[in-house]
Image: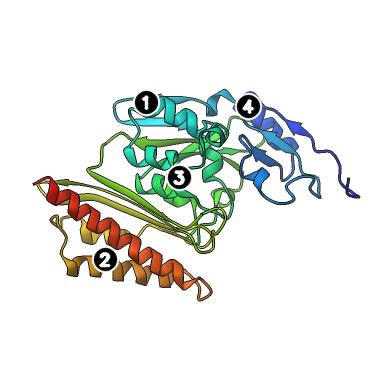
Amino acid sequence: MYEGIRSPTVHTPKSLSDLSVALKRSTNPTIFAGGTYIMSTPGYYPKEGEQDIIYLGGISEINRITRNDRYIEFGAGVTLQRLLTVGKQVLPSLLTEAIESTSTTIVRRQITIGGTLCISHHRLLICAVLAALDAEVEIRSFKGSGTPLARWIPIKDLYKRNGELKLAELSKDKNILSSIRISLGKETFSTFIVADDVMRNREEAVILALRCTYDQSVITSFRMCLVFPTSLFLIPQEISTYINGLPVPLSTSQIERIVSLVTERISANTDSSSPVIQTERARRAIEASLHALNAQGLSER
């Protein structure tokens, strides 16, 4: 063992009330459920400092999946494989495909949806897809040992423009992401593109998630999320405003304008050290997605 390293205290709360007590007793704890990302990082244990561990896997409130006519809600402790198995018939196809594209079945049995969203400095495919689906997340703020205060926010408000998690900044209290909620409305078109390996080559990888509906060939509810895993989390609202109301197929000039607008936003939100390859991959991914939208629209005529 390293000098000065002590064995951590491991808290295993069984309810949100127990979690409130554990948070009060701990200073800067490591919080985990599946642990797949934490244990893939170098030097995760042993670690210097008075760092306790809080295991969330036993909290029933964050391991539930519920649905009604409007939305499906799943706790942050639900694993990707369980979500895929239980909700495959009702989940948006974009989310289903994203989960199936994440690692292997064995690893997905361990990866929790909350853990995927709450990595501090690294955004993954699920984050981009949920943002494109206008998901909401429930944040519980713990103060003392009382009942935690809960509020829902759009998932886009969970991250800074550079993709960093801002959970700690949402209030002066300790915050936990407890649930995710997405609408059950079906999109007409959806796609995602992943360029390069988001775990092994995250500084050059690109993720694009895009979805929309169209009625009588008129585009509505367009949403795009572009992610550079370590440096950009972009939902260009002006693109949605521009595209909504346009007919399918989009013209070449319209696609060029969309690509140009997104490129401008990338330049405005990333520093000069960002690899040029990411911007080029983003351009090509957007073009490919919009041409796929055109192809689908034309095939249905």
Gap between marks 1 and 2 measured at Cα: 36 Å
Residue identified by numbered label 4: 17
Gap between marks 3 and 1 measured at Cα: 20 Å
Report which quarter residue 290 is drawn in. bottom left
Disc 2 marks a residue whose amino acid type is Ile
Disc 3 marks a residue whose amino acid type is Ile
Determine the residue positioned at 54% across, 59% down. Answer: 202
Residue identified by numbered label 1: 67
- Which badge, 4 or 1, comes first in the chain's sequence? 4
Determine the residue positioned at 43% across, 27% down. Answer: 85
Q: Is mark 1 on a helix, strand or loop?
A: strand
In the rendered structure, the answer to whether residue 192 lies left or right of residue 47 reads left
Gap between marks 4 and 2 measured at Cα: 48 Å
Residue identified by numbered label 2: 258
Number of labels in the image equals 4
Gap between marks 2 and 3 measured at Cα: 24 Å
In the rendered structure, the answer to whether residue 170 lies left or right of residue 70 reads right
Q: Residues within 10 Å of mark 1 (few under 14, many from 20)?
A: some
